[in-house]
Amino acid sequence: MERFTRSFTQQEPIPEDAIAAAVAVMRSGRLHRYGADPSEVAALEVEFAARIGAAHCIAVASGGYALGCAMRALGVGPDDPVLTNGWTLAPVPGAIAAIGATPVLIEVGEDLTIDLDDLSAKAGRARVLLLSHMRGHLCDMDRLMAVCDAAGVTVIEDCAHTMGAAWNGTPSGRWGAVGCFSTQTYKHVNSGEGGLIVTDDPDLAARMVLLSGSYMLHARNGTAPAQAVFDRHAATVPNVSGRMDEVRAAILRPQIGALSGQVARWNALYAALEGAFARAPGLSVVPRPPKERFVGSSIQVLADPHGDVAGFVGACGDRGVEWKWFGGAAATGFTSTHRHWGYVAAQDLPRTDAVLARLLDMRIPLTFDRDDCAVVGRIVAEEARRHLT
Ligand SMILES: *Cc1c(COP(=O)(O)O)cnc(C)c1O
């Protein structure tokens, strides 16, 4: 029987120009962003803001920190309700819990995006929506913004899986008041840990720079608003240290420059797997709407509910093909669901639960090639025939 032997978690090496830049930072001894002038972090902020068309960018310690920083800057505090997706990664409800706020979970549909009818029904309960583009699936952003604008809800976008993606021509991260990105190893650029925040609002930008810890050197942020804006906030915004350092920014700048090429490579691998999975009985690849420009860094399928999903996942695993199944009783790896988030009050999400019971997720590392996708596709089709029909 054919077996697949490559790792689903093996990243590409850091590009040589990024390594050279990081070594130069280390030789300088100036690893703190506010101690380096010129600063790699400030340059990264300028370049990322320009790439995505935002007025301001703030580089921080992680994607999770970025989410918390954005909520704090918007004035979300203890016991405030925050709307968010019923299916997302644990750092999203975690960021809400970390500031003492209360997640209000919204149903997710078979397209894996937030259910806009459920959002409409619950929008009156909160001032802020922390919208997670989980696994890179974008909802109808035009309609979502209309719902939120009508209800007076401010949107923060969690773009951990959508760096390089867009809806209807507008990049993800540019629809809401704030967009938050992760540069953690398993996202679209790799600095180990890290986060990037974008906004057009100078007051929010100033508050987030101050929050991240700027020691009065806030004007050295690459896209700093005017001093008068900082003067409005400096006395009242606490320092909640979470800056990015110079080494990570040095590693990221060449990767941001190369992102478009990487997106094309991801989408070619995605297309190869999508074609192969389309031939597997009992599995349907979650469709991508024409208005969505996505980054195929992972692929999601829904299994036939009458099949033996656990048997299918186990048999694929025995042959080296790793699926993450969100329907398992226990959370394994990153597959925790709202039922496992003991710090969030239990909420009734029957539609989401029905989707998660059938949801299988596969990471697509750029260390795979088309031949690898063909092997994975053959194994999946064979085991689907055995277990899902
Ligand atoms: C990874 C991730 C985050 C948080 O990013 P970190 O940089 O790991 O803190 C947030 N949301 C989603 C959907 C993620 O996958």
Image (cartoon, grey):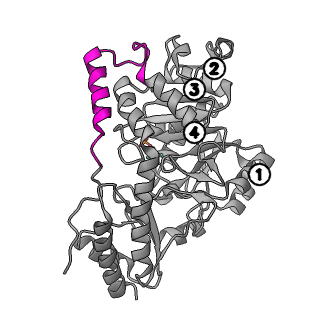
Residue 147 image offset from top left, x and y in percent: 76, 53
**Which of the numbered marks, if any, corresponds to residue 208?**
3
Query: Which one is in front in this view, the residue at disc 4 or the one at disc 1?
Result: 4
- Label 2 near label 1: C-beta < 8 Å? no
- In space, the residues marked 3 and 4 are separated at their CA atoms by 18 Å
Mark with earlier residue (4, 1):
4
Residue bearing the label numbered 1: 146
> Of all residues shown, which one is farthest toward the bottom?
389
Residue 1 image offset from top left, x and y in percent: 19, 81
Residue at 27% in and 77% down: 315
Crowd class of label 1 (few under 14; some 14 to 19; many from 20; radius 10 Å): few
Q: Looking at the picture, does residue 170 appear above or below residue 73?
A: below
Q: Is the CB–ligand 1 distance for label 2 below 8 Å?
A: no
Residue 340 image offset from top left, x and y in percent: 44, 57
Q: Is residue 16 magenta?
A: yes
- Label 2 near label 4: C-beta < 8 Å? no
* Front residue of this view, candidates 336 and 279: 279
Q: Is the CB–ligand 1 distance for label 4 below 8 Å?
A: no
- Please provide the residue range marked out in magenta: 12-40
Residue bearing the label numbered 4: 52
Crowd class of label 4 (few under 14; some 14 to 19; many from 20; radius 10 Å): some
**Which of the numbered marks, if any, corresponds to residue 225?**
2
